[in-house]
Amino acid sequence: MNQLPVTPLSPEEQQRVMHQIYVLMGKQVESYHKHRHMGSNSSVPVELAQELMESIDYTLQLAGGIYANTNVEETLKIGQDILDGKLQKAKSLYELVYATAPQWQTECRWEALRYLRHYLDTYDHLHLAHREPEELFYPMLVSQPEGIRGVDRCIFYLNVMWIENQIMAGVPDDMLELFWDRLMPETINQCEQLLLNGIGKAILGTGIHSLVFEPEEYVMIISALADATEECLSDAAQQLCQWLNLTDENARMYVNAIIPQLTLRHGSSIENLFV
């Protein structure tokens, strides 16, 4: 454990707290073995002991930390109840994301969902609460907030995927067939490409009755972006939100997250952004 989540305590209080944590650690080891049907062994490898202690630290922080006269075991239980609520929220959000995921999504996106399902099925909020999804290669347009750990990181990913589902659902199916046919096989995040093309169409004022770019439109978009201000790009993003009937503020913010890709490219390289 890196540092106990405590307010300044007297030496006597510190000793009392450390004794409680020592006793609690022993109970956590016993509970860990029981949880995994491993008998009543009271010892664990050093690496696992460190993880069990890190989980205690993380869970206590969720419950508000340690103060004078804190009952550490009761505080841990409060934190575990908080985590159980987060886990149930994550599972419900997963079901929503899975049920609304477009059938044409990339294999990378399907793999991300499979991995998140496995993570939620195996997440142990009682003993290894600090563990978080690590094997996710599906790119997001926004960075995860600093400091989030454990199941909160899973919830972040699922929230972003739910936003993407809403964005992609805003495009009628009859507009998409040619667009998906145009996507390169190595495309990982098709929602990102949809937003790029949609904003490009908004800049040109051609609407999204067809998301794909015609040859003459590549020349037009290069010229338009050369003179486009940030305000112009923001207006185009808002126009796309209207076309897609996006009213959720988080979804609208996600659309705006594509703008830096349009401001950092120059000249003919712009053409490679669109399909």
Image (cartoon, rainbow, N blue to C red):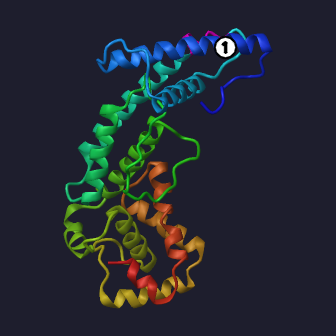
Q: Position of residue 13 (x, y in %)?
A: 74, 12
Residue extending furthest toward the right: 10
Q: Position of residue 248 (x, y in %)?
A: 44, 48
Q: Nearer the viewer, residue 127 or 249?
A: 127
Residue placed at 24% from the left, 61% from the top? Answer: 172
Instruction: Report the quarter where the C terminus lies.
Output: bottom left
Amino acid type, mark 1? Val
Helix, strand or loop for the magenta stretch, by majority: helix
Q: Residues within 10 Å of mark 1 (few under 14, many from 20)?
A: many
**Left or right of residue 192: residue 223:** right
**Left or right of residue 198: residue 65:** right
Q: Position of residue 159 (x, y in %)?
A: 41, 44
Residue placed at 42% from the left, 49% from the top? Answer: 160
Q: Label 1 belongs to which residue?
A: 17
- Viewer can see residue 242: yes
Residue placed at 55% from the left, 74% from the top? Answer: 232
Q: Is residue 50 above or below residue 96?
A: above
- Viewer can see residue 92: no
Q: Quadrant of residue 210?
A: bottom left
Instruction: Report the quarter where the N terminus lies.
Output: top right
**Left or right of residue 182: residue 167:** right
Residue placed at 46% from the left, 17% from the top? Answer: 28
Residue extent of the magenta highlight? 70-75
Q: Secondary structure at mark 1?
A: helix
Q: Quadrant of residue 196?
A: bottom left
Numbered disc total: 1
Q: Nearer the viewer, residue 169 or 65?
A: 65
**Magenta region includes residue 223:** no
